[in-house]
Image: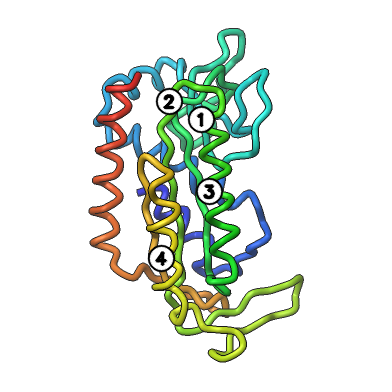
Amino acid sequence: MRLLNKFRSLFENTKYVHRNSNLGNQVAVEFFEDLVDLGKSSKLVSRVFSRDRVVNLRNTTTGRSARRGDGTFGELVPTATPVLEEDTLIARGPTANIEMGAETKIVSKAMIKQVDRVIGDLERQVRMFRKHGGNPLCIGFVGVNWSESYTSYEGERPFATDGKKYKHPIQEALAAEKRLIIEAQPLFDEFLILQFSATNVPPYPFQWINYKKLVLEYNALLTRVSREYDLRY
C-alpha cells in the first residue's frame, strides 16, 4: 500500500506544508507502483518490466502542452532512455501519450471554503488528461481530514481552528465529502476519498478513520483499474 503509506508520511511525525505543490505528485505516482505490485494486469506488468511504459514526472505528453497533473503513465518516447530510480518498479521518462492519469488533493482545514477550488482543479485536470484523446483512465484521490482540531502555518506563524470563526475539520468534513462525491467523483473513472485525522501540531499524530475499510476499497479500486487497463490497452 505504497500510496497510503506515502500519504500518511505527509502528516505523521512532521509538519504538513499545504503550499507545497509537489506533495500530491509524491502520493499519486505511488498508485502506479501499487498497480504493478498487485500484478492483476498482465499487459501492464509486462510493459512496465520491458520499460515500454513509464511514469512521466513532468506529467505532460511530449510535444503537447498541458496543465501539471500529479501523475501520468504512458508509452515511452521511442528515442528516450528510461530511468529506474531506487525502490521503484516503474521507470521514469517522457511519454508519447497518457494511458492513465492520477490526481491527488488534500483538504485539511477550511474545507467548505476550499472545496469549490478543489473540485474546479479536479475538473480541469481530467479535461487535460483527456485533451489529446486516447481515452486515458483517470483516477482521483482526495484526502479529507476528520480531526477535532487543526493548525495550519504561514511560514512559522500558526493558525489554529477554534470551532467558531475557524471551524474544526470534523465540523465540515461530512459536507465536504458530500460535495466531492456529487460533483467530483463522476468526472473520474475511479475516485476514492481518504478519510484521516491529523492535527498538524507536535508530535504530529496521524490516523486513518477506518483503515481496514480503506484498504479494502483501495484494493478493489486497483483491481478494477487493472481489469479496465487490459480492456482499453
Q: CA distance from mark 2 to mark 4?
A: 27 Å
Q: Tell me where residue 55 appears, x and y as whole percent.
A: 51, 29
Q: Under tag 1, what secondary structure?
A: helix
Q: Amino acid at mark 4?
A: Glu
Task: Identify which amino acid the numbered label 2 is placed on.
Answer: Asn
- Decide which of 14, 102 is in the foreground and name it: 102
Distance Cα–Cα, label 2 vs label 1: 6 Å
**Mark 1: which amino acid?**
Arg
Say which residue appears at 75% left-offset and 79% top-offset: 157
Q: Say the numbered circle drawn on residue 122.
A: 3
Distance between the alpha carbons at the discs numbered 3 and 4 = 14 Å
State yes or no: discs 2 and 1 in contact (Cβ < 8 Å).
yes
Rendered view: 82 above or below 125: above
The residue that label 1 is drawn on is: 130
Q: In which image quadrant can residue 83 be found?
A: top right
Direction from residue 58 to residue 190 in the image, left or right: left
Q: Quadrant of residue 139?
A: top left
Q: Residues within 10 Å of mark 2 (few under 14, many from 20)?
A: some
Image coordinates for residue 191, horizontal then vertical, percent: 38, 49
x 49%, y 59%: residue: 9
Residue 140 x/y as whole percent? 44, 47
- The kind of residue on which mark 3 rests is Leu
Asked whether 120 or 233 is in front, the reply is 120
Q: Nearer the viewer, residue 83 or 226?
A: 226
The residue lying at 61 percent from left, 8 percent from top is 79
Q: CA distance from mark 2 to mark 3?
A: 17 Å
Above or below, 178 relative to 64: below
What residue is pinned by disc 4? 177
* Cα distance between the residues tagged 1 and 3: 13 Å
The residue carrying mark 2 is 135
